Amino acid sequence: MVGSVRQFLGMSLLGVMSVATLPSYPRENLCKLPVAAVQLNSSVREENNTENPPVFNSAQSSGSIILKIGLVWIQFETPDPRSRATGRFPMYGRRLRFTFLWCASLCLCLCAVPVYSQILQEETLAGPDAHETAENTKGYLFGEWGGVRTRLLERGVKLDLHFISDALWNIKSQQNERFASYNRVRGTVDIDLGTLVHQQGWSFHATAVWQTGDNLGSNLGLVANPSSIASMNTFRLDSWWFQKSWLKTRIAARVGQFAGQDSYGDQNFGKSFVVEPIGGSLGNLSNTFETFDPPSTPALEIHVVLIHNVYVKSMVSSVDRLPFSNNPTGLAPYFHGPPVSVSEIGFTPGKKASSMVPTDNATTRKGYSGLYQFGASYNPGKFSVPTSATPRSGNYLFYWIASQAVWRADPKEAKGLDATLSYDWSPRSINSDYTALTAGLRFNEPLPLKIHNTMSLGYVQNSLSPQFLPSGAPAWQTEHGVEFNTLLNVLPMIIVQPVIQYYANVGGGAQRAVVFGFRTKVEF
């Protein structure tokens, strides 16, 4: 049994990450594996096929290295001595590699008090990819695969494959009317290793995406993108991680490749809206190059529940200013420049603060509960400023997000009104889109239908820094956007979400735009 499980996990990792051929180890020796091994130059892939770990040649100072953390090999770029003149931040890269190695060793090799992972009950996806209904209430287009899906769940393996599409028209704007469709297919596997191989508290997650289409926000010149899924066209591994939980998930740590914006600055009610700043993560979190999906980067995270409904969490991730170009497949992550750090403290009245990502769906909305988040991100790297030819060191951003159930027809049910409000700020001397405000209302089950439904009204506001105004151009105006949508769970596996949006002062100018369309989501 152990051999079969080991082969299954090994093939899963190889198929998803395709990083290197992994040696085989008995399960009971998992915590005794060499924590790290590095090898310079291109011959490292051949060295990986041996049982003996490669040896680091300290006489060389540049090239590529492979970092082995438990079962995972990660490729890094070692600093070139000449990189100081080219802005490659060798000092930060070296510190980040040793910090990553030390923390990864701590996270992956501690043998702690046994606890039971709740990964199959928790939501591991964020924004529009998160699920509107709970696992035990949603349906699948391809059914139960003859009972295979249920048997896998009983063994701690959850598979998810869904399709999401935004079909939008700019029915009124300065630009010519056009239809824009953006589509995404995401496949995800979550494994509760406590159930599968009796490694209590351990879990594994991996997700990959294929996405393509037309980005209407770029075509219209909007700051707030009408679609929260529109991005670069790609087919790649998004994220993977190993997670260890202690004390009934009161303490949890992650190591792997994942994005900061999936859980730091991500809107708790995001799936209920279509426009980006309120339908996903706050749009200008990227001011500090806080990582986003799908081009996730190597990261470490720790989450601690201080008391019943108060948590703190923090993560450090690699910064890659050109993630789609530098790592187009997501299979060979490495570091570029200094790390970005993000921290958050949260208050969850009405629910336990025990999961890494707070779960909001049609089931958890029952009763009065809320989520209040305050966070900050910091990047010590160099940033250009419009008033000086000399780059400035360091950039930061603060954000506040409040989400609360404000009225329920029955205090024990979900029907009622929810409200959300968010605001973020960063220095306008460094950032063009330096502050954003969002607000929204969601009415759960407003229509007398047997299917799940919501109606949502959202508002977004983006302010642009006058220091980035081109010479001779009229002053920026604050961009405003309003959205109204209705979400209909027409079949257990299909959600349709008609939406209309209105924008004033498009891109800081004087133009207006009206966008109409719908979002479709299908669970396979």
Image (cartoon, rainbow, N blue to C red):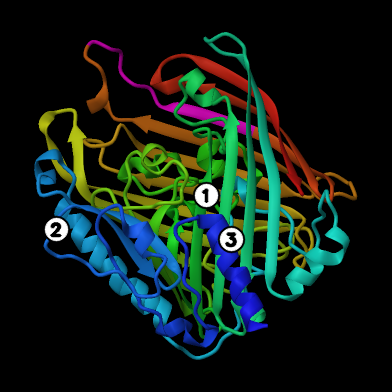
On screen, residue 513 versus residue 443, left or right, reads left
Task: Determine whether 374 is above or below 127 in the image.
Answer: below
Task: Please tell me whether mark 1 sits on a helix, a strand or a loop.
Answer: strand
Q: Determine the CA span between mark 2 and mark 1.
A: 31 Å
**Number of the front mark, 1 or 3:** 1
Residue 423: image location, x then y, percent: 42, 46
Task: Please tell me whether mark 3 sits on a helix, a strand or a loop.
Answer: loop
At label 2, which amino acid type do we have?
Gln
The residue to which callout 1 is attached is 237
At label 3, which amino acid type do we have?
Thr
On screen, residue 222 versus residue 270, left or right, reads left
Q: Which residues are magenta?
A: 472-483
- Closer to the chain start, of discs 1 and 3, is 3
Residue 155: image location, x then y, percent: 72, 75
Which quadrant would the N terminus be assigned to in this image?
bottom right
Disc 2 crowd rating (10 Å Cα; few below 14, some 14-19, many 20+) is few
Give 307 or 254, whichever is nearer the viewer. Answer: 254
Task: Determine whether 364 is above or below 454 in the image.
Answer: below
Residue 61: image location, x then y, percent: 14, 56
The residue to which callout 3 is attached is 124
